[in-house]
Amino acid sequence: MSDDSYLKDLQEELFEDAKKKLAENGYELGEYNPHRVSAWWVVNDHVKCLAIGQHEQEAIDNCVDANLWDSLKMSDEDLEEYESNGWHDSFIRAGNASEAFWSENLVVRKILTA
């Protein structure tokens, strides 16, 4: 199997998973969607998450609230050091609790809008 065919298969699989994720949450393709809820592929270091949301931050929040980012949570000591040094580009506050998570390698891609 060539790299191109592998990537194409992976992309098609992700698209199908995105359609399923949207449908599970009540959003069918082509139907009324005034808030433009979309499926997002969220990758941060070793953690990958397919989430829905109106925008990137909501998708990230949904990954966090589903306990998928627990391994990326910053320690209190690291957070204090990074905040005091103004290194705010290394972490993001996410989830309902607005906890701090490492985000230096964060990539968020919109896969599909219902």
Image: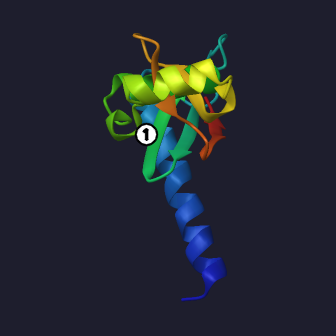
Query: x, y (%) of residue 102?
Result: 51, 36
Q: Residue at x 56, y 60 (%)?
A: 12
Q: Residues within 10 Å of mark 1 (few under 14, many from 20)?
A: some
Q: Give the quarter of the image for residue 5.
A: bottom right
| Colouring style | rainbow
**Which corner quadrant holds the C terminus?**
top right
**Which corner quadrant holds the N terminus?**
bottom right
Q: Is residue 11 left or right of residue 25?
A: right
Q: Nearer the viewer, residue 46 or 22?
A: 46
Indicate the amino acid at tag 1.
Lys
When the figure is inspected, residue 73 is found, relative to residue 34, above or below; the finding is below
Number of callouts in the render? 1
Query: x, y (%) of residue 103?
Result: 57, 37
Is disc 1 placed on a helix, strand or loop? helix
When the figure is inspected, residue 94 is found, relative to residue 48, above or below; the finding is above
When the figure is inspected, residue 45 is found, relative to residue 30, above or below; the finding is below
Q: Residue at x 42, y 30 (%)?
A: 74
Q: Could you tell me if residue 64 is visible in this image?
A: yes
In the picture of the structure, the residue carrying the numbered disc 1 is 20
Kindly give the residue lying farthest to the bottom in the view shown.
1
Q: Nearer the viewer, residue 89 or 38?
A: 89
Q: Is residue 23 left or right of residue 83?
A: left
Q: Give the quarter of the image for residue 11.
A: bottom right
Query: x, y (%) of residue 4?
Result: 66, 79
Q: Could you tell me if residue 37 is visible in this image?
A: no
When the figure is inspected, residue 27 is found, relative to residue 68, above or below; the finding is above
Query: x, y (%) of residue 14?
Result: 52, 53
Q: Nearer the viewer, residue 64 or 28?
A: 64
Q: Residue at x 63, y 16 (%)?
A: 33
